[in-house]
Amino acid sequence: MFEVSDLCDEVIFINKGKIISRMSVAEVNKRFEGKGAIGMEEAYIKMIGGDV
């Protein structure tokens, strides 16, 4: 999902058919910086409570 950072201004994360988060790419990077997430996919996994 590295393309997301290059192509999108805003990201909506969906889990089990429900929107769990909506934020800018910059907000995702800031929120998950230093938490082991190195991209959108890893940020999503962290957001739903999984391990990267």
Image (tube, helix red, strand yellow):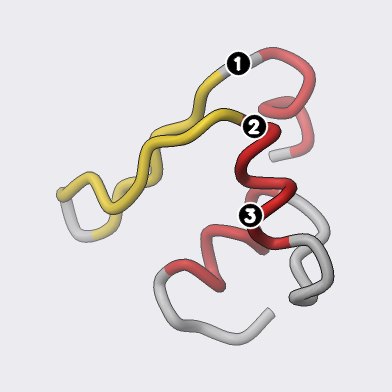
In this rendering, the answer to whether 6 lies above or below 33 is: above
Residue sitting at x 60%, y 16%: 9
In this rendering, the answer to whether 47 lies above or below 4 is: below
Q: Under tag 1, what secondary structure?
A: loop
Q: Under tag 2, what secondary structure?
A: helix
Could you give the CA–CA distance between mark 1 and mark 3, rounded to whole angstroms? 16 Å
Q: Position of residue 25 (x, y in %)?
A: 64, 32
Per the rendering, the mark at residue 26 is: none
Of pointers 1 and 2, the one earlier in the residue sequence: 1
Amino acid type, callout 3: Glu
Residue sitting at x 62%, y 60%: 43
Mark 1 burial class by Cα count in 10 Å: few <14, some 14-19, many 20+: few
Residue sitting at x 82%, y 59%: 38
Mark 3 sits on what residue? 41
Mark 2 sits on what residue? 25
Q: Under tag 3, what secondary structure?
A: helix
Q: Position of residue 22 (x, y in %)?
A: 38, 37
Mark 1 sits on what residue? 9
